[in-house]
Image: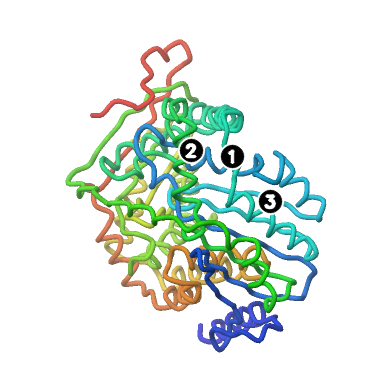
């Protein structure tokens, strides 16, 4: 293991120190960090190996910052950000970036909204001007709102309302949380999407898209010594705003299992359940990550071997460590094969967990999981975009970009005893919420309840 880690860190060192910048904030990683007077935090990492630049912005806002009545606004706003600003007409943003040989995109999570572009290095100056103008003066009018409202509503229909797995996921979070905003999905509820007003969007923009609520990371072929002057020129007149109110985690402890039976037109039964866990900065997070890999990463994983290969009761099965800024859920999903039941699926998954609870996992399984996580981490460091996203996310959410390089040593310290301990600690039926899908024919769907029936 020690030899592997030396090789791995050597690769990371080469990837991250391919820079001619004189500024050096640590002995091995030449990231230049500065903060403008308006509070905008900027990270810069030169890499002249290819004539390309990645520009990545993390706004510290997601669906956890919403409230009933405006759920889905964070995701709706992500769409609105591409529809023009004071100096640039709608769609020109993408046109100019594509003309520079690049691309742009964005995504919304429960905790953040993130925007990114990758362009040829001569196009960076255009990107700076485009990003500054939409942060300063996004085009917020009725036309922009109504156009994107319709698109987001259709997205909800496709990915949630008309999706079995999507609707089951929504129902699970709706029922696992009773006070925290994690109880709704980033897509929001349909009636809330209808109710969002233009004034809601303007208030949201002023509060959460302020420069002091954002982190920008730029990685690639540029001159770090002149970047600060350019960022100052383009962004300095964007006013700082009063910081948003912190999200209160008022979720009470779950003291007993919650079950929901969900009826809808479907071919096969399925079960989706989750256990309450800590947040993604908790000490147990690395062990839960590795457990997730052991349980469902690849055909040699425990869940696949047991439910798909040996018992042949599942067509699909997976787990997911969905830890977030606030405590989240460790998830399980399984779809039955024809003739099999959700009771069989549940029993088989619980048996896998019970075996780990009583006997633990092998050193080989754990080492294999560590290797997979290490390779996945290192792969983010092989591209400008991967590094930009990693550094920006850690700067915004995890106490600083340097902390990104603590995750591998944390994985390395996890023992087989830690894996067994977290199974015993978190996977108890008292903190479990279970959604059971009961298939109906289309002629029976008059009894369908979009939120299921609690037992």
- Bin the neighbour count of mark 2 within 10 Å (Cα to Cα): few under 14, some 14-19, many 20 and up: many
Alpha-carbon span between mark 3 and mark 2? 22 Å
Residue placed under numbered mark 1 in the picture:
80
- Up the image or down, 138 lies above or below 43; here it is above
Alpha-carbon span between mark 1 and mark 2? 10 Å
**Closer to the observer: label 1 or label 2?**
2
| Quarter where residue 273 is shown | top left
Residue placed under numbered mark 3 in the picture:
104
* SS class, disc 2: helix
Nearer to us in this view, 143 or 217: 143
- Up the image or down, 447 lies above or below 64; here it is above
Residue 400 visible to the viewer? yes
| Quarter where residue 281 is shown | bottom left
Mark 3 near mark 2, Cβ–Cβ under 8 Å?
no
Is 70 displayed left or right of 118 in the figure? left
- Counting residues from the N terminus, which is met first, the one under dot 3 or under dot 1? 1
- Bin the neighbour count of mark 1 within 10 Å (Cα to Cα): few under 14, some 14-19, many 20 and up: many
**Residue at position x 44%, y 73% from top?**
411
* SS class, disc 3: strand
Single out the residue that lies furthest toward the front.
237
**Residue at position x 76%, y 55% from top?**
102
**Residue at position x 38%, y 47% from top?**
64
The numbered mark at residue 201 is: 2
Residue 324 visible to the viewer? no
Is 199 displayed left or right of 248 in the figure? right
Mark 1 near mark 2, Cβ–Cβ under 8 Å?
yes
- Counting residues from the N terminus, which is met first, the one under dot 1 or under dot 2? 1
The numbered mark at residue 249 is: none
- Up the image or down, 232 lies above or below 352; here it is below
């Amino acid at each position: 293991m020690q030899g592997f880690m030396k090789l791995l860190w050597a690769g990371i060192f080469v990837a991250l120190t391919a820079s001619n910048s004189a500024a050096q904030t640590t002995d091995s990683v030449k990231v230049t960090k500065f903060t403008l007077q308006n509070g905008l935090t900027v990270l810069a990492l030169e890499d002249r190996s290819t004539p390309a630049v990645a520009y990545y912005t993390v706004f510290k806002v997601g669906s956890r910052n919403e409230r009933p009545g405006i759920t889905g606004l964070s995701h709706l706003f992500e769409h609105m950000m591409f529809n023009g600003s004071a100096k640039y007409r709608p769609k020109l943003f993408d046109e100019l970036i594509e003309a520079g040989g690049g691309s742009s995109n964005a995504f919304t999570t429960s905790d953040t909204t993130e925007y990114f572009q990758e362009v040829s290095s001569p196009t960076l100056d255009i990107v700076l001007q485009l990003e500054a103008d939409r942060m300063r003066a996004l085009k917020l009018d009725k036309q922009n709102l109504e156009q994107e409202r319709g698109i987001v509503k259709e997205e909800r229909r496709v990915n949630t309302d008309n999706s079995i797995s999507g609707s089951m996921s929504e129902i699970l979070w709706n029922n696992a949380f009773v006070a925290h905003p994690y109880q709704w999905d980033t897509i929001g509820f349909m009636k809330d999407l209808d109710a969002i007003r233009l004034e809601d969007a303007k208030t949201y923009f002023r509060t959460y898209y302020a420069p002091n609520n954002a982190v920008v990371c730029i990685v690639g072929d540029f001159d770090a010594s002149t970047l600060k002057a350019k960022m100052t020129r383009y962004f300095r007149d964007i006013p700082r705003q009063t910081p948003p109110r912190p999200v209160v985690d008022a979720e009470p402890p779950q003291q007993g299992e919650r079950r929901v039976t969900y009826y809808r037109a479907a071919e096969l039964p399925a079960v989706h359940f989750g256990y309450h866990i800590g947040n993604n900065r908790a000490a147990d997070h690395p062990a839960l990550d590795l457990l997730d890999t052991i349980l469902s990463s690849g055909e040699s994983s425990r869940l696949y071997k047991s439910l798909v290969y040996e018992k042949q009761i599942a067509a699909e099965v997976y787990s997911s460590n969905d830890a977030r800024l606030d405590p989240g859920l460790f998830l399980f999903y399984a779809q039955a094969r024809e003739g099999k039941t959700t009771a069989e699926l549940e029993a088989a998954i619980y048996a896998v967990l019970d075996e780990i609870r009583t006997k633990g996992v092998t050193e080989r399984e754990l080492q294999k999981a560590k290797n997979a996580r290490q390779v996945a981490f290192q792969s983010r460091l092989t591209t400008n975009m991967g590094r930009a996203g990693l550094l920006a996310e850690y700067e915004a959410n995890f106490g600083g970009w340097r902390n990104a390089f603590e995750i591998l040593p944390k994985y390395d310290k996890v023992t087989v005893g830690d894996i067994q301990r977290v199974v015993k600690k978190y996977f108890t039926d008292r903190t479990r919420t279970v959604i059971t899908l009961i298939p109906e024919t289309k002629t029976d769907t008059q009894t369908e309840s979009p939120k299921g029936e609690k037992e």
